[in-house]
């Protein structure tokens, strides 16, 4: 048994707008072989993108997953979209892990938070 505890669950903080949000909503296939490892790698990799602000995740019991990535500017979002490892993971996702997905990119014009 590990002595390390999970980090507390908290939403990404509210940043001063404008910034961008990429909302990735998926319905996954039954076979998720290799997904967890690839997902962990993508989470580590995106943190190296200058202008990456954070990421929120949610999943319903029915299998719908939503990931929202926040980026300071369009250039940061483009850098992530064009990353070679990310592109390879996208291709594998379409072939193996996703039954369907949508991607919505939005410019955040207002942001607030409460703690």
Image: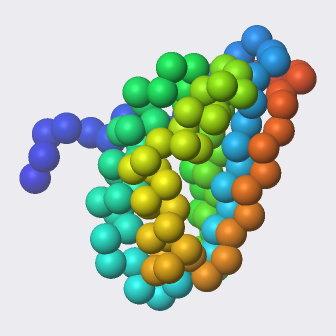
Identify the residue at horizontal 41%, vertical 27% (top origin).
Answer: 48
Q: Is residue 115 above or below residue 95?
A: above
Closer-to-camera residue (114/44): 44
Left or right of 77? Residue 105 is right
Q: Is residue 58 above or below residue 31?
A: above
For residue 75, side relative to residue 50 (left or right): right
Which residue is situated farthest in the left direction here?
1
Residue 11 in the image: above or below residue 104: above
Q: How many marks?
A: 0
Image coloring type: rainbow
- Residue at 51 percent across and 20 percent down: it is 50
Identify the residue at horizontal 35%, vertical 59% (top origin): 38
Looking at the image, residue 47 sits to the left or right of residue 29; the answer is: left
Name the one closer to the observer, 81 or 109.
Answer: 81
* Residue 58 seen by the camera: yes
Vertical order, 73 against 57 (above or below):
above
Q: Position of residue 96 (x, y in %)?
A: 46, 80
Horizontally, residue 41 falls left or right of residue 103, namely: left
User: Which part of the image, by quadrant, shows the C terminus?
Assistant: top right
Q: Position of residue 21 (x, y in %)?
A: 73, 37
Residue 11 showing in the rendered view? no
Name the quadrant containing residue 111: top right
- Furthest residue in direction top, as rendered: 16
Q: Residue furthest right?
A: 109
Residue at the image point whose x is 75% and y is 23% from the top: 19
Quadrant location of residue 22? top right
């Amino acid at each position: 048994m590990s002595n390390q505890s999970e980090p507390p669950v908290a939403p990404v903080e509210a940043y001063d707008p404008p910034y961008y949000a990429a909302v990735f909503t998926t319905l996954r296939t039954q076979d998720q072989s290799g997904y967890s490892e690839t997902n962990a790698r993508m989470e580590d990799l995106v943190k190296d993108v200058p202008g990456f602000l954070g990421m929120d995740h949610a999943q319903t019991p029915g299998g719908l997953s939503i990931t929202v990535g926040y980026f300071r500017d369009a250039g940061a979002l483009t850098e992530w979209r064009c990353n070679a490892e990310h592109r390879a993971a996208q291709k594998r996702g379409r072939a193996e892990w996703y039954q369907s997905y949508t991607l919505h990119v939005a410019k955040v014009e207002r942001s607030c938070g409460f703690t």
